[in-house]
Image (cartoon, grey):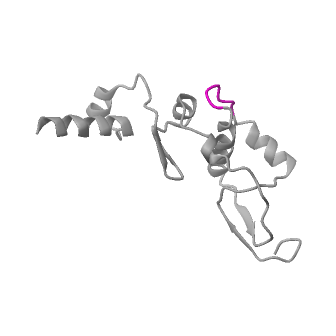
Amino acid sequence: RSLSGASCALGLASMTRVFAATTLQSLLSQVESDPEKPWNWLLELDLQIHHAKIKAMSCADGPMPEVDYLPQISLTQHVSHKHQVEMADFDGRREVSCIKGANWFEVARKGLVAPYCFRRDVMKAFRQLR
């Protein structure tokens, strides 16, 4: 229960957050500014919360208005390289940022999991052969 007596549930979620100062300092020490998109620090914070497996308490109290940051973030080269992500879906808005310099020959030769852009390009090449 919350301080006001509302029912609460424990889980992973993206929402308004309240942290102990030491927890917030630890999370923010891993967050880097993104020169391409300043709002991406909130995306970085969400990813750090996820990696740290921090559980959030969601309570059925009254709503707390806040600015929705999802329309403001994007999959920039910075985020793509740092987290090795080439495709992201931000609430229905799919973005692609291919990692430059990847050695596709090594992917095929060593049997590594192929990145999104490699798989997309291979599928496109096979469709053009028809």
Q: Residue furthest left?
A: 130
Residue 25, position in %: x, y?
81, 41
Vertical order, 96 against 22 (above or below) = above
Vertical order, 5 against 52 (above or below) = below
Residue 110, position in %: x, y?
30, 34
**84 on left or right of 112:** right
Between residue 129 and residue 51, name the one nearer to us.
129
Quarter occupied by the N terminus: bottom right
Camera sees residue 115? no
Query: Is 127 inside the magenta-drawn segment?
Result: no
Question: What residue lies at 32% left-to-right and 28% top-to-bottom?
Answer: 104
Residue 67, position in %: x, y?
73, 50
Per the rendered image, the range of residues in magenta is 32-37
Residue 73, position in %: x, y?
61, 40
**109 on left or right of 90:** left
Between residue 31 and residue 53, name the one nearer to us.
31
Quadrant of res 72? top right
Question: What residue lies at 24% left-to-right and 40% top-to-bottom?
Answer: 123
**78 on left or right of 16:** left
Question: What residue lies at 39% left-to-right and 26% top-to-bottom?
Answer: 102
**82 on left or right of 11:** left
Between residue 97 and residue 69, name the one nearer to us.
69
